[in-house]
Amino acid sequence: MSDMPVTENASASRSPAWNALAAHAREIEPLHLRAIFAADPGRGDRLALDAAGIYLDYSKNRITDETLRLLVALAEEAGLRARIDAMFGGDKVNVSEGRAALHIALRAPPGAVFEVDGKNVVPAVHGVLDRMAAFAGRVRGGAWRGHTGKPIRNIVNIGIGGSDLGPVMAYEALRHYSRRDLVLRFVSNVDATDFVEATRDLAADETLFIVSSKTFTTQETMTNAHAARDWALAAFGGNETAIAKHFVAVSTNAEAVAAFGIATDNMFGFWDWVGGRYSMDSAIGLSTMLAIGPEHFRAMLAGFHELDLHFRSAPFERNLPVLMGLLGVWNNNFLGAPTVAVLPYEQYLKRFPAYLQQLTMESNGKHVRADGTPVGCETGPVYWGEPGTNGQHSFYQLIHQGTRRIACDFIAFGQSLNPLGVHHDLLLANVIAQGEALAFGKTADEVRAEGTPEWLVPHRVFEGNRPSNTLLLDRLTPAALGSLVALYEHSVFTQAAIWGIDPFDQWGVELGKLLAKRIVPELGGGTAPAHDSSTNALIRRVRALRGTR
Ligand code: G6Q
């Protein structure tokens, strides 16, 4: 790995700050983290940052003080400060869709002012939050009754992408705070198995469906919502009046919600300036609020807000999301690490990597700049991961001894929500040990000194020099989750500013949707497939399997 060339990406001539970093990367490339730490013994304390309840140790990155200085210069050259001001100012920073990206207003306190087109949106945000809280109070308190007069026991969120991943992640993450007598399920996939398995053991008269869709036109969600409607109607003998007791909607599209048969009273709105993957703190979080209650939900929003304030005001060199974003650029563009493993040592965060996959990869997986010109360098790295310690017994082998460079984000909490024996000591010892092992490895001499036979020595060598961040928090509270999510949101934004891309659109998902629509009638057999030979052959094969030649 140490002889891996500096990426072409980094050496391609770009701006002065970029070129300075590329030249600097050639100096850093031969240095091992062992040497970097030996030359700078105080870095473990110095290259760390504490903000909004999050301690970030970034000293195990392959950086020096000079690297940080150059990265901050890159942020300044890219106009990051102006980009932040533009986002907070409600400018249409989502240029390709002509929209603001004002998710920060969703967690602003009541007195704050965030304007879109000259109008303060904060009162409307709190209006919806209050309605959600009143509704959640009725459902949780048993005042909301189903068609047969029974209280709600089961809540099924139907949504996909941004209308699913945030709610699922937050429900799992905050399960400790949730009402254990409520069953929460999430249906997203157009594969009927998802719906059937989620509802098979539920009593319709105790079940509430939340149809969560910003547009209320998404194929998967509408297909599942209609399946849910049919399922409920079948249980209620086709009585349409039952629907009002068992369906609510979260959407920006009041007309489509009404057309589906859900009364406006049972609809919770949000706005076009909330991107799907930035919406878990909007009404899209209704399932979260039902599970954990309005107080905990508001605490989560406060955690988001605290990090927002930090991002807005802290100088770049002491700014958590800016630093994490810049370190990501350094690893991705200058040290040739194309992926980031997110490794939470917290079982409740088991869906956090999946959530981050959408947040990071749908935001920054772009090949052109905001002005449409080719971006000319690598953009969003691949994010993936699993909770520790499970991953250690699986894919960590490749991270430790494989030939690819992988940057790691370890996430850990000082306190367990479920203290039990020595479990948490072991968990924390493992996460700390992994960062240490990745950075410093084990040399051939150290392996030999253990009496290892010579032929086995190469197999037991750990090269080390693998970069990692460690995020350490006190305990997984709703506020901590909010801060953690906001940290990644703003880190993604920072990177987008460096690459000059629009992190708020997602045109890349459109083509597949369009082609799928074309293929539906072709599968039925009535229409001849008219594609390339591979696609045609697959369609014919499916027809044969289904007997619709
Ligand atoms: C997220 C994307 C996308 C979106 C889904 C669901 O940023 O826009 O994942 O959330 O396609 O869209 P609807 O909420 O409109 O159903």
Image (cartoon, rainbow, N blue to C red):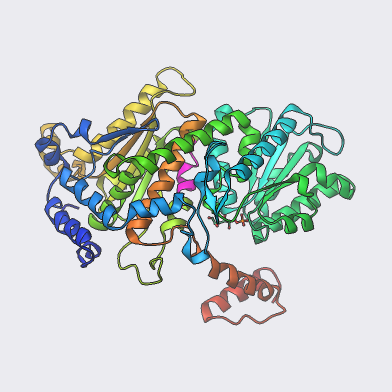
Magenta segment range?
A: 349-357
The percent coordinates of residue 155 (x first, y second) are: 70, 39
Residue occupying the far front of the picture? 118
Asked if residue 160 shows in the view, the reply is yes
Q: Main secondary structure of the magenta part?
A: helix
Residue 435 image point, x, y percent: 27, 36
- Residue 531 sits above or below residue 164 on the image: below
Quadrant holding the C terminus? bottom right
- Magenta region includes residue 350: yes
Which residue is depicted at the point 63% across and 49% down? 270
Residue furthest out toward the top: 421
Residue 362 magenta: no
Question: Is residue 144 positioned above or below 271 on the image?
Answer: above
Is residue 265 found left or right of 300 in the rendered image?
A: right
Residue toward you, 537 or 53: 53
Q: Identify the residue at horizontal 36%, vertical 54% (top origin).
A: 82
Query: Residue 341: x percent and y percent?
Result: 36, 46
Residue 212 in the image: state x and y as whole percent: 66, 49
